[in-house]
Image: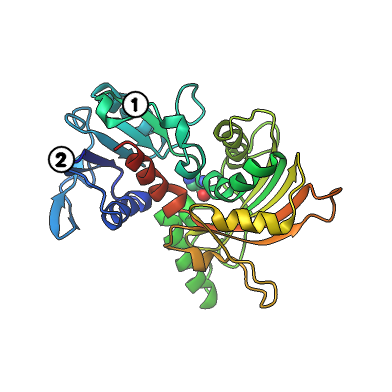
Amino acid sequence: QGPSVAIVGVTGAVGQEFLSVLSERDFPYRNLKLLASKRSAGKQITFEGREIVIEELTEDSFHGIDVALFSAGGSISKKFGPIAVHKGSVVVDNSSAFRMDEGIPLVIPEVNSDAMSHIKLSNKKGALIANPNCSTIICLMAATPLHRHAKVRRMVVSTYQAASGAGAAAMAELEQQTREVLEGKPPTCNIFQRQYAFNLFSHNSAVMQNGYNEEEMKLVKETKKIWSDPDVKVTATCIRVPVMRAHAESINLQFEKPLDEDTARQLLRQAAGVVLIDDRASNNFPTPLEVSNKDDVAVGRVRHDISQEGNHGLDIFVCGDQIRKGAALNAVQIAEKLL
Ligand code: 2RA
């Protein structure tokens, strides 16, 4: 008798990926409730050979729900997450609403599952677990095995983020603009109010007082929380690039202890959820296309940082599927830890 599961935001890109991942991983749900806005209520979704009717999300949606996977934006999570917890559900929230709250576990299962070890469905008690931001997940999947071995003192991250991070509409607009530009037509700019096709631009999140945007500050703050290391120095520059659904990240690391390239490669080869693609002879390294729709984060360009003294610096390049490991897969892996 597995858990009863609800998906909040089932019509979105991540909501749809929740369904794919639950099915592919044969998650042992007893029943499945699909929740979305009034606009989508009543529509049917074919899942595992049966028709499921989407229900409108209301305060009464969580009776008897053991696990509620949320990906419907921060305001929906803020309003309905606590209601679900009060009804006894364990909420896995993909929004940023609760990530930095004291006492709310922010979890990448391969990295810090101990942060949620006190939460089990058998406790029959509601709780909320936050899914980190996609660019944080993808970065830390690669950086953590190295951090555990040689302790990162400083991390510099440059991200190249896919359209999917801005939602299904942004993916559709990228495709539409690409066609329009190739046909010599003016690009339709509704999502980003600028041409996206054949272009790139600073991440579309708000720029804060310190000149960093919200996406960059998520990487900085979430890394410190997930590593339980408030002193680690992190800086980031997040860029939106014309790629559909996988993020790429260039990561420079400064370690407390020496770490040579070969040891780093060995650690990455052994890391769960990571695949090493690091073939200098054929100039073959991770690409967003090759990790798209896949679970693993790919790491390559592993090299000693020649600008740092001794063996304390390393550069790596990482790609990961933003909708999958960056959101839906990570959340379902958290749910699996509850069983
Ligand atoms: C982005 N990290 O890629 C965000 C998605 N939540 O824009």
Residue 22 at x, y = what percent? 28, 51
Of residues 62 and 39, the one drawn nearer to the viewer in this rendering: 62
The tag earlier along the polypeptide, 2 or 1, is 2
Q: Classify 10 Å Cα crowding around label 2: few (below 14), some (14-19), many (20 and above).
A: few
Is residue 231 left or right of 62 when viewed as pictured? right
Residue at horizontal 47 percent and vertical 30 percent from the top: 115
Residue on which disc 2 sits: 1
Residue at 18% x, 28% y is: 60
Q: Is residue 81 left or right of residue 240?
A: left
Q: CA distance from mark 2 to mark 1?
A: 21 Å
Q: Say which quarter of the image contains residue 262.
A: bottom right
Q: Residue at x 74, y 59 (%)?
A: 303
The correct choice, above or below, for 200 with respect to 9 in the image is: below
Residue 323 appearing in the image:
no
**Residue that mark 1 sits on:** 127
Tell me where residue 9 appears, x and y as whole percent.
31, 44
For marks 2 and 1, give the one nearer the viewer: 2
Q: Residue furthest left?
A: 50
**Three-letter amino acid code of the residue under disc 1:** Ala
Tell me whether circle 2 and circle 1 mark residues in contact (CB < 8 Å).
Answer: no
- Tag 2: residue type? Gln
Labels in figure, total: 2
- Up the image or down, 248 lies above or below 9; here it is below
